[in-house]
Image (spheres, grey):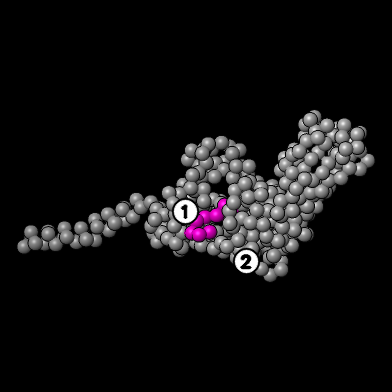
Amino acid sequence: MNKVLAYNVLLIVVIVILIPALIIGSMKKIHFNPQQSHQTGKGEDVSIRVYMHEKGTILEMNLETYVAGVVAAEMPGEFELEALKSQAVAARTYAVKNMVLFGGSGLADKPGADVSTDYQQSQAWLSSEKLKERWGTEYERYWSKINRAVEETRGEVVTYNGEFINAVFHSTSGERTASAKEVWGFDYPYLISVPCSWDEKSPRYRERKEFALTEIEQLLGAETQVMAAMQNGSGVTQIIDTTPSGRVGQIRIGNKIVSGLTVREKLNLHSTRFNVAIKDGKMIFDTVGYGHGVGLCQYGANGMAKAGHDYRQIITTYYTGVAIKNIQSDLGLLGYHH
């Protein structure tokens, strides 16, 4: 009888205590696997490894926290909520595409990191301390709105034919966005030139810069011989061709033919959509737009939001033929490649 009682007690201990403990222990060991989409849980379970370029360290943080810091750094806090949502989706897409967790390559020169806070290498990102310095008394209002934009798009990314897109963006397109092919030479079907009339109120829409001809020779090289061209009357400058979106492809300055991209870089112009004239011994550049012009136009997004368009309409306007999916609920539909 005592043996039976002892056996029953032991059985109860096994059923009530040991088996649940083993199950819980095994659950804690489960790691996120892109192929097991329905086991990913909530978005807060997804972490991203960020290279903090100012400190030279890698910090692991919540993906949505990272996205909020990118939106705050890349888009003005006073923008409309729907514009901020479109930026959040674009920023999240860029991040996820680069994350090793989702089959991305991460940062080649910073092993272990998915992205960098250096905008020249990845996307800009700012901490709450930096944002308080930038926004001052508006911090609480802007930060609350940005967090709402991130929360209301939680997990959403942009895809084309089931794969994450290169979700590039810029400040102000100026009449039309540019295609990826005309800027970088890579042809992406979702990064084509599209009309944009919503960014005309951008403070960066137009810019005029004047240069002395001697300064042009210093910046573009003495072989331009701008002064000699001016003196012999052969014509100082001529736009040779423009891209399909109206940006300068090649231009002759003095005796040298250079690309519009080179002129923008060397002269620090806002964009490659420019006209040039000579007046009073100076070379004058009138520029329209700000940035490379490819993908999402930020001021255009804000203009669309003001006109009543939601973030999904904004996204599908600037990225052609894309779909918006969710890394939580739609992950199994995306067809990741490793």
Q: Quadrant of the N terminus?
A: bottom left
Residue for badge 1:
46
**Where in the figure is residue 261, as x and y percent of width and height?**
71, 43
Q: Earlier in the sequence, mark 1 or mark 2?
A: 1
Q: Residue furthest top?
A: 222
> Which one is nearer the viewer's eye here, 149 or 272?
272
Q: Which amino acid lies under the numbered mark 2 shown in the image of this protein?
A: Gln
- Report the disc number at residue 147: none
> At 69% across and 65% down in the image, what residue appears?
304
Which portion, as a residue range, is magenta?
160-167
Does dot 1 land on a helix, a strand or a loop? loop
Does residue 134 belong to the magenta stretch?
no
- Report the disc number at residue 313: 2
> At 65% across and 53% down in the image, what residue appears?
179
Left or right: 28 as drawn, with respect to 50: left
> At 57% across and 62% down in the image, what residue appears?
321
**Where in the figure is residue 297, as x and y percent of width and height?**
68, 56
Marks 1 & 2, CB-CB < 8 Å contact: no
Does dot 2 land on a helix, a strand or a loop? helix
> At 40% across and 53% down in the image, what residue appears?
32
Q: Which amino acid lies under the numbered mark 1 shown in the image of this protein?
A: Val
Total tally of numbered discs in the picture: 2
Viewer can see residue 265: no
